[in-house]
Structures are given as structure tokens and as C-alpha cells.
Amino acid sequence: MNVTYSEFRRRARESLRGQWGKSVGAILLAAIPSVILAFLGLFSHSMQVAGNIMSYLLAGMIALGSAGFFLAIARHQRPPATSIYQGFNFPVKAFLLYILILIFTVLWTLLLIIPGIIATFRYSMAYYILADNPGMSPLEAIRRSKQMMAGNKWRMFVLQLTFIGWMLLCIPTFGIGYLWLGPYMAVTTAHLYDELKNKEEKPPVPLTF
């Protein structure tokens, strides 16, 4: 029997108990590189171009580190907020995974918008998989995400929709509310990942930092 959406959210809240402050701090740390690059881009066009290039180089590492951090939170571990940068330990793999997902998603989007949206959910577990298996190749992480999400893309879509009310409530806060909503959604997704993973293999090994 599938876990209900409300149960996934309950598990996320339980995992985040006592770790909200750390999670908000991790979100702020993840944003620092982008803020610095945007600030430097104000001084000249060349620095703006260089900043845009650096943003592409860093995006995959931040996404990988975020996946690992919130996966650890979901597993009731206590990772330091700075572990949001753990993706920097695997720069090449993180960058390749980011570029490959971007290319595949764009190619599907060129067909129609709907296939592009479906592709987004198809590859949504790739960063969690690579964070769990840092020795894996980016292409293998994508392949396993496709396999894991087969028959589960709709579940992922509906799970995201259940947060629509919270998203609307965050608008009047000028985005500040997203500092709490972001971790809530990420840890909920991590619980979905673990549930799907446990259906395929033995229970996950604790992450190390």
C-alpha cells in the first residue's frame, strides 16, 4: 500500500523537528554563491557574463549538496549546515549531471511543454541517487531515476501540488516564507525517494560527512 501524501509531509515535519534553524541556515548558505556572483555582475558586463558561466558551473554542486543534506535530515541524522556544500567534493560529476538533465529536459520540451514537465519528474531523483552513491556516474544516476520514477511521476506531481497552499501563503512574506517551505518540500521529497528506494533494495546506509 502506497504511503499517503499527508504521511510524507508528517514524516518530513518529524524529521525537521529541532532542525528547522539549521535547515534555513543551509538554504541561506546555498544562496550565497549566487548572491555574490549577482553582486559582482553589477560592476561590468564582462563580470556579469563570467558570473552567469560560474552560476552554471556551481548549480549542479549546490543541487547535489542540497540533496545530500536534506536526505540526511530525512533519515534523522544531524548534518552540519555547511554540508550543503558537500557537492563541491564532486565538481565534475555534479556539473555533468546538471548539464545532462538540462539537455534532456530541453530536448523533451522542444517537442511539447507537457513532455518537458514529465521529463522534470523523470529525472527528479537523480541528485538524491548520486548523493547516496557518489561513486556512480551521472548517466547511471539519470538511468536509475528514470527507473525509480516509472509509474511514480504522477505521485511526485501530486505531492508537489499539496504544497500549493503554503506557496500562496509565502507570497505576502516577500519570499521569506520560502526559507522554511524549501526545506519542508525537500525533506518530503527525500522521504518519497527513500520509500521508492526501499521498494527496490535494502534499507539505505547512513550518509557520512
Image: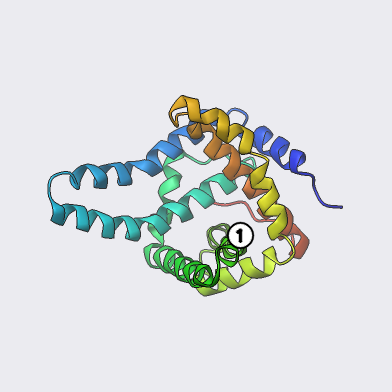
Residue at position x 63%, y 48% from top?
Answer: 189
Say if residue 106 shows up in the picture. Answer: yes
The vertical placement of 97 against 61, above or below, is below
Q: Residue 149's spot in the image, x, y percent?
A: 68, 63
Q: Residue 115's spot in the image, x, y percent?
A: 59, 67
Residue situated in front as seen by the camera: 180 or 21: 180
Quarter where residue 70 is shown: top right
Q: Residue 118's spot in the image, x, y percent?
A: 61, 63
Residue situated in front as seen by the camera: 174 or 2: 174
* Amino acid of disc 1: Phe
Indicate left or right for 57 with 20 as reference.
Answer: left
Residue at position x 45%, y 66% from top?
Answer: 102
Badge 1: residue crowd in 10 Å (few <14, some 14–19, many ≥20): many
Quarter where residue 199 is shown: bottom right
The vertical placement of 155 against 99, above or below, is above
Residue at position x 67%, y 53% from top?
Answer: 156
Residue situated in front as seen by the camera: 207 or 99: 99
Query: Residue pushed farthest top?
Result: 173
Say if residue 209 shows up in the picture. Answer: no
Query: Residue pushed farthest front?
Result: 112
Residue at position x 43%, y 28% from top?
Answer: 174
Q: Secondary structure at mark 1?
A: helix
The residue identified by callout 1 is: 121
> What is the number of callouts on the image?
1
Indicate left or right for 41 with 120 as reference.
Answer: left
